[in-house]
Amino acid sequence: AKDPVRVLVTGAAGQIGYALVPMVARGIMLGPDQPVILHMLDIPPAAEALNGVKMELVDAAFPLLKGVVATTDVVEACTGVNVAVMVGGFPRKEGMERKDVMTKNVSIYKAQASALEQHAAANCKVLVVANPANTNALILKEFAPSIPEKNITCLTRLDHNRALGQISERLNVQVSDVKNVIIWGNHSSTQYPDVNHATVKTAAGDKPARELVANDEWLNGEFISTVQQRGAAIIKARKLSSALSAASSACDHIRDWVLGTPEGTWVSMGVYSDGSYNVPAGLIYSFPVTCKNGEWCIVQGLPINELSRKKMDLTAQELSEEKALAYSCLS
Ligand code: NAX
């Protein structure tokens, strides 16, 4: 039998945490033959709720779940973890300045970076979900210099999956037959959902999604804005933000990273830019990636048209501004 993998979920008493921890315990993140030990972190005001989640995990009697650590101690939470899913953060409340929210998150991610650097297992893979996800991941990277930069990523897979979902609904095809959309840039409304390389499986082989949709006005307009604004649409409908889809996408992100992407398929991940596609180096930016042997690699050489270029630059610009704001919040 395999040794258990230790998976940290921060913010585990929150909405996404509640949807995510049972998925991890069921083997949806790391596979049906991979035992796991869950490490759950939250802050003291949520300690009782966190303990309730632990009770439910015990009650669910998951065969793969070999242990649960539920704690408000960052060091205890981070000790020995192989995978860290960072969902905890400070949400933007009405009337709050961007700078104030950034200051809170910068201080959280700075502290948690140090704890991970000192106490996580070597080669720990980190996924930041909490917003501003790209910039929180960048802060984490800056303050955990001994963690390889390739191990620090942020979640844009939910946006990627939303884009697949929109194409599948539009064409009335199975979502599993649609692939290779791309989310470029920030996990925010400036993200660029790009369908120019996406394909759909048909009886006659894979066809370009753009050809099958045959409506550039929709693809260049409503499709993009629907994906960009989907988070807000969910809040409007549910009075709560996306949780099950976020949790499921976080599992997709880690699973593909650890176990690999299928041949001929790429996914979107927020990763440390090396300057590919003329995206400024030093930002955490979402790119198309393939994964193999536990490592992601940016898909190279895709042709970029003028419209795409503009949208890719716009979201990079926003990330550069966020980075500058984050640095101005460091104390
Ligand atoms: P909740 O407010 O339900 O849960 C957040 C939890 O984090 C709370 O239990 C809170 O006590 C805890 N927390 C706060 N500070 C902490 C700290 N310093 N250490 C550990 N835990 C801490 O939010 P939820 O709906 O679960 O969303 C969590 C985060 O995901 C938010 O930042 C949200 O904006 C972000 N999202 C990111 C998405 C993405 O695709 N990247 C999509 C979904 C989601 O909106």
Image: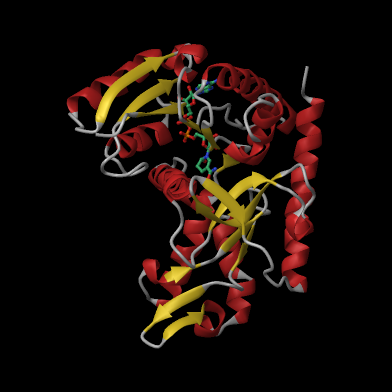
Residue 149, percent across and down?
65, 37
Left or right, residue 234 beside residue 91: left
Location of the C terminus by quadrant is top right
Tell me the quarter of the picture where residue 178 sits.
bottom left
- On the image, the x and y values in percent for residue 62 come to 21, 32
* Residue 151 sits above or below residue 273 on the image: above
Q: Where is 81 relative to 246, above or below? A: above
Left or right relative to 178: residue 127:
right
The answer to whether 212 is drawn above or below residue 86 in the figure is below
Name the image quarter holding residue 112: top right
**In-front residue for pair 103/60:** 60
User: Is residue 101 something one can see in this rendering?
Assistant: yes
Q: Going 68% across and 37% down the picture, which residue do you hit?
A: 135
- Give percent across and percent down for residue 217: 63, 79
- Residue at the farthest bottom position: 204
In the image, taking residue 142 as reference, residue 212 lies left or right, namely left
Task: Using the image as rendered, state which of residue 290 and residue 319 is in the foreground.
Answer: 290
Q: Which residue is drawn at 79% across and 28% down?
A: 327
Q: How many marks?
A: 0
The answer to whether one can see residue 96 in this image is no
